Image (cartoon, helix red, strand yellow):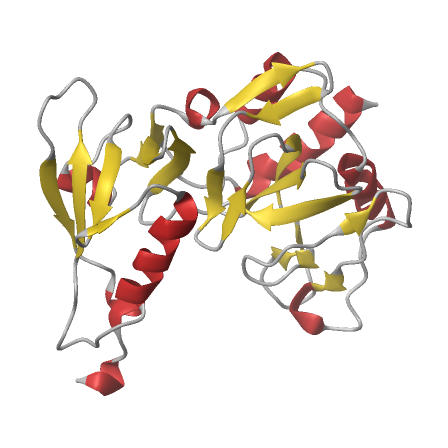
Amino acid sequence: MLRALCLLLLAAAAACAASFRLTPDLITAMPWTDSPDGVRVAAPFLVNPNTIVPAGSTIRLFYVRPAVELEGQKARPAFDYGDNRSESVNRMGTGIQPSPAGGDSETKIPRALKKTLDTAHSTVWPNLASFRSALQSMEGADMRVVYQQPGSKSVSDETFGLLEGLLLSEKDDHVVIQAVRDQSDAAQAGLQAGDRILLLNGQETPTLAAFLDIYRTVRDSGNLREQKPYLFHILHSGATAPVDISLEPPISLSGSLLDQ
């Protein structure tokens, strides 16, 4: 059943895969480990700019949200979970209850696909090797992660999206860069996998939660005339002295054309 599940979802991934290259690659970078109960999160990490997946969580599935073809319209996601919003599901209940894409009540969710995703939400991958095999062809623009937090009977289905091109985790009282998106502003500025972020805009970042608080403050302040860069005070892997790296926020995050 698991193999059939992988093949079906990988076919959907191939249909909507996009350029999503990381250094190191996603398979190597994810802070996961094998356990008797399945693939576990070894260190807290950001699955998207709004969500921290805690250590000890069980990773159930990585998938690309399938698209449906509607007559006279472009393909669009088969399920609309909302941006970076958890879709919690009780494992003992009836499974996922996604809304039709775009809120169109006439859109029909394919029964077989819904059954497949219901099964995925109640599946525990047996080992890291299985996950790595599946992830090799699952790089896309609409990737999602299904995971279960420690002690919870529900699972969460979250958008997978990097913060400023960075895959971040929390280790030894520091925020650590696990991987950097190729050709991103972060990569071009000199941020690298293995960097420890000591300060962000002059404030300490011992946890991902602290990092996000500072990041959001910078992101939500100013306008196009008062852009505030993200100033990373980081320690490169193997280096003895930290350095400062400045990263300009995208225009879309720093204001509106109406602010000019």
Determine the residue positioned at 8% across, 27% down: 241
**Count of numbered circles on the image:** 0
The answer to whether 19 is drawn above or below residue 131 in the figure is below
Instruction: Using the rendered image of the protein, determine whether residue 34 is visible from the camera's viewpoint.
Output: yes
Task: Decide: is 85 above or below 156.
Answer: below
Q: Position of residue 22 (x, y in %)?
A: 35, 31
Can you say which quadrant of the picture contains the N terminus? top right
245 on left or right of 122: left
Q: Nearer the viewer, residue 190 or 11?
A: 190
Residue sitting at x 17%, y 52%: 202
Q: Give the image quarter of residue 103.
A: bottom right
Residue 127 x/y as whole percent: 66, 15
Residue in front for this viewpoint, 21 or 194: 194
Judge left or right: residue 108 versus residue 241.
right
User: In terms of image quadrants, where is residue 115?
Assistant: top right
Looking at the rendering, in which quadrant would you find the C terminus? Answer: bottom left
Q: Residue at x 26, y 64 (%)?
A: 218
Front position in the image: 204 or 176: 204
Q: Could you say where residue 77 lies in the image, as x and y percent from the top left?
A: 63, 56
- Can the viewer see residue 136 in this picture? no
In the drawing, does residue 234 fall left or right of residue 34? Answer: left
Q: Residue 52: x and y, percent?
A: 51, 45
Q: Residue at (25%, 61%) from the top-left corner?
A: 250
